[in-house]
Image (tube, rainbow, N blue to C red):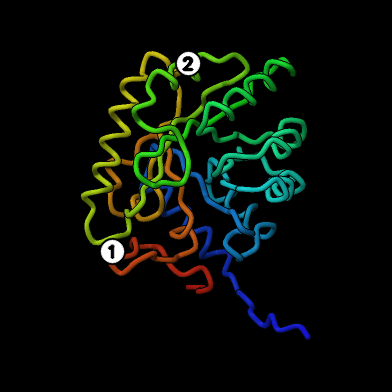
Amino acid sequence: MNQHHIEVAICRKTFANNIRTLRDRIAPAKLCIVMKANAYGHGLRGLAPIAVEAGADYIGICTNPEAAIVRELGLDITLMRLRMGFPDEFEESIDDLNIEEQIGSIAAADYLSAAGTKRGQPIPVHVNIDTGMGRSGFFPFQVEDLKKVCRLPGLRIVGIMTHFASADGQDLAFTQQQLEAFHRLRNALNNYLPDDVLTHTHNSAATVRLTPHCNSLVRVGAAAYGVRTSQEFKKLSGIAASHVCEN
């Protein structure tokens, strides 16, 4: 017996307007719309074209099947993996999916460096720094390791990033500490990073609450769908729930 009786109705116009509102707020920073987990259950196949048309610079995914859907749609958009991939995922993504990968360990950096050298084309990667999220990433004290990573052949460093643990909480003190730790490390690596490297830290809550510190790219998930992740801050003016169509 099928007990899955949940249905999500999406207003495409509202979703597009949300993205345009966010894009205008963060300009000139670039905008990554997070569409992992089938666009949070809203439907990746239906919404990815709208995100591109509305001005997204990146689509954030986690899995190769998600990336394959976007590629099947023929969309001219850069894909960023929002976690470190596994070796079998790398094999497929390198050959077919053209994903900008995330690295947060020496092992992942070495693996992709060897793969990029073997194919004769560097693999674009975002270097993840764990400033307090506790999920994955290099730690800020690994400065010398990170300098070595930046010099590895077969890699093209396109981004350096971190992820806030509590930007939707009442107290933003820890978020500020994370931001400061990240920028200290970012400055220490300045001579080892490309001039055009993207610096990104902000999720939805930080994009709304700490816009002046949004760096050169933001990764927005919940806000694009009109979702507020806590009661500690208000939605942006112009952002609406993605199931609501307004005239």
Residue found at x 29% / y 60%: 169
Residue 213: which disc? none
Q: Which marked residue is nearer to the observer: mark 2 or mark 1?
A: 2
Callout 1 amino acid: Phe
Residue found at x 56% / y 29%: 125
Total residue callouts: 2
Q: Which callout, 2 or 1, points at the residue further toward the start of the chain? A: 2
Residue 235 occupies which quadrant of the picture? bottom left
Residue beneath disc 1 = 233
Residue beneath disc 2 = 148
Secondary structure state at the residue bearing disc 1: loop
| Side of 65 relative to 192 (left or right) | right
Residue found at x 65% / y 57%: 44
Q: Is residue 138 above or below residue 42?
A: above
Residue 180 occupies which quadrant of the picture? top left
Callout 2 amino acid: Lys
x, y percent for residue 230: 34, 66
Q: Nearer the viewer, residue 21 or 69?
A: 69
Q: Nearer the viewer, residue 60 or 53?
A: 60
x, y percent for residue 172: 23, 53
